[in-house]
Image (cartoon, rainbow, N blue to C red):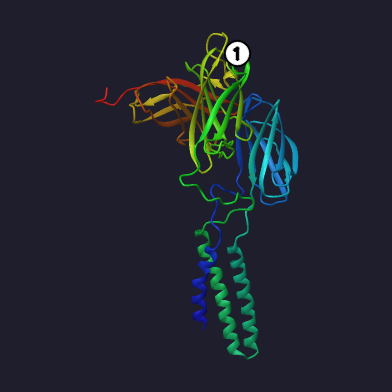
Amino acid sequence: MIRRLLCLVVALVPVLVCAAPAAAHNVSAGADLRIAQTIAGTELTVVVKGTTRVPGPLRIGVIAYQPVTGLPVELEVRSVEDGRAVTGVARAAARDPEYVELKVERTGPHELTLRAGNEVAVVPFRVLVERGSGAEFLIYGGFFLAGLLLVGGLLTGALARPGRAVLLGGGAAAGLTMAVMVIVFEPMLPAGPPDGAAPVVTAQAGGRPFVQARMETVPARPAAGEEFTLRVDLVDGSTGRPVDDLALHHEALAHVVVTSEDGRHFRHVHPLRTAPGRLEVRLRADRAGAYIAHAELEREDSGGQLLTGRFSVEGKGPEGPESGPESGSVSGVGARPRSQPAVPVAGRPATIELDASGSVRPWLGMSGHLIVRSQDGAFLGHVHEMGSGGPRLRFTFSFPRAGRYLAWAQYALGDRIVTVPFTVDVTAPEGTR
């Protein structure tokens, strides 16, 4: 009898545990959410700390990657489901930012509104809380049942009823076996979705289509030295509706690289979501001429894509290279990057090394970024530091064709982002020249 019970438990436990729902894609309860924003003329990262209970506190802080002191950022967290909102003010800091606690009442979709200077961004996110699993119920229930039956068996045996004592002892063994089996198998099984996760939607064959984009400047003809807005409108080509399901990748909804045609102007920025399907970032160019904008983004269940637009800046503007504050970083700091081989070969990996001018801190989740553009602007590549550690940064990149490339290596120091511009001449493989 006891042996049959044990065999039944061994057979049923994996089935019961496997009945838990599968984990949702890209859902992580308890993890911090980091969102890069180019706002009020500076580069910030908003950190939303993971929460463990609801109702409960949601801690939000703002990290500065430019030399700003105590820039106030007004915060509002609003539940999309019931409209309830809470507000607070955080002050940006490069080191040890203050975290504001805002009480949230429920899990699920929320909107985080940021106000700094005279700019406003609205970032959608979800409040997620880990849900208790069925495995915990089986583990604690099994131990409780085993303990209860074991005590009952001992008392029954003391009353000279050995048949019942054996039966109760078998039940205790079955409960203990169930708990142990769940402990063994539970780490191998996927966790169920947390409270507040998006409902599971049947994926389209091949994923969602790529977005269609329209880039424009406001005003339409910006003048050199004056501020203007670069606007990116995203539309689903199959429905005509605004695309508002961008996935955070490398701590941003989108990465926008703006360069002048000659490469003397460079900006790597992170636009604000100002409306569903609309991204905007404020810029200033000190030189007239043609400009190229590349936007890297990723739609959920679709994949990454690169969008390109062009615009012109009118007027003369000052001569010479643009200064650090206007280009959004400190340029030309540190030793010139080195390439191995010295002259890269098209289609083959090359290693780019440079020595940082100070202690490097993570930015956009990485120690460093290398952005490469073909001279005509038709190609843009973006890779990350290889994680070598220390002050020496190493990148691996394969140039697609022979020719001259414009490149910018970027990393963050204690209070600012450093940009090192350089050029690379790439040769064609032997036999194709």
Residue 87 appears in which quarter of the rendering? top right
Is 122 in front, or is 209? Answer: 209
The residue under the point 54% across, 63% down is 19
> Horizontal and vertical percent for residue 379?
43, 26
The residue under the point 51% across, 67% down is 15
Tally the numbered discs. Answer: 1
Is 416 in front, or is 249? Answer: 249
> Horizontal and vertical percent for residue 143?
60, 71
> Horizontal and vertical percent for residue 117?
70, 25
Q: Is residue 344 left or right of residue 281?
A: left
Find the residue positioned furthest to the left.
Answer: 431
Find the residue positioned furthest to the bottom.
Answer: 160
Judging by the rendered image, the residue that carries numbered circle 1 is 223
Q: Quadrant of the C terminus?
A: top left
The residue under the point 55% across, 76% down is 174
Secondary element at image label 1: loop
Q: Is residue 245 left or right of residue 115?
A: left
Q: Is residue 359 visible?
A: no
- The amino acid sitting under disc 1 is Ala
Q: Is residue 63 visible?
A: yes
Residue 372 appears in which quarter of the rendering? top left
Label 1 crowd bin: few (<14), some (14–19), many (20+), radius 10 Å? many
In the rendered view, would you say 68 is above or below 14?
above
In the rendered view, would you say 91 is above or below 130?
above
In the rendered view, would you say 291 is above or below 20?
above
> Horizontal and vertical percent for residue 275?
64, 33
In the rendered view, would you say 141 is above or below 271?
below
Is 336 in front, or is 103? Answer: 103
